[in-house]
Amino acid sequence: MSEKRLLTAERSKLGKVDLATSLRKEGAWDTLTLETRKRLYALLPAPRPGEPPHDPDVNPLKTPLRPYIEEELRIWQDDLKDGKETKKWREEAMLAGVERREGKYDEWKESERERNFGVAEPENALGGEDGEEDA
């Protein structure tokens, strides 16, 4: 299986394994180049004032960042299994976002609000002209 398919296919093996456990194994982090480890650490929140800087020689799954990384791995795996990493899904999601911004679903949204709650959303529900609350 190609790398791209491994990272995007709904039935990828990566969606079926316990990634956190695999990545915590001794030596797993060390198989990455120093440049890759630095790039991965750059994706994580910066240390707070007074905390030591990230050490690219230390597996981040063996730091206090572990629960956050594990949660993001779980979310990514769920998205992978749900087909949300495929090119087709991503293109459809981008198109839906554009269509929402253009108001394509406003009429449907309003009819659903009335159907579910019995009332339409009042004009300018948040206050001021631009949707901000009045002072």
Image: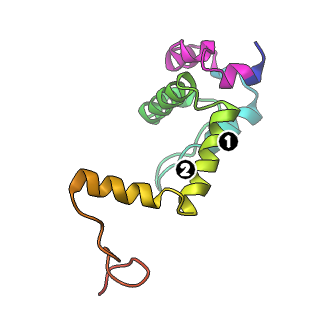
65 or 70: which is nearer to us? 70
Type of amino acid under label 2: Ala
Location of residue 119 (image quadrant): bottom left
Residue indicated by mark 2 = 46
> Position of 2 compared to 71: left or right?
right
1 or 57: which is nearer to us? 1
Residue reaching furthest to the left = 118
Residue 124 rendering spot, x and y as whole percentages = 35, 77
Location of residue 133 (image quadrant): bottom left
Residue lying at 76% horizontally and 28% vertically, measured from the top left: 33
Q: Which residues are magenta?
A: 5-28
The vertical placement of 76 against 21, above or below, is below
Q: Quadrant of the C terminus?
A: bottom left
Residue indicated by mark 1 = 91
Is there CB contact under 8 Å for labels 2 and 1? no
Type of amino acid under label 1: Glu
Q: How is the image coloured?
A: rainbow
Residue reaching furthest to the bottom = 135
The vertical placement of 30 against 55, above or below, is above
74 or 51: which is nearer to us? 74
The vertical placement of 135 against 50, above or below, is below
Label 2's element?
A: loop
The vertical placement of 86 against 102, above or below, is above
Q: Residues within 10 Å of mark 2 (few under 14, many from 20)?
A: few
Residue lying at 51% horizontally and 20% vertically, measured from the top left: 20
Residue 110 rendering spot, x and y as whole percentages = 37, 60
Location of residue 23 (image quadrant): top right
Residue 123 rendering spot, x and y as whole percentages = 34, 76
Give the mark nearer the N terminus: 2 vs 1: 2
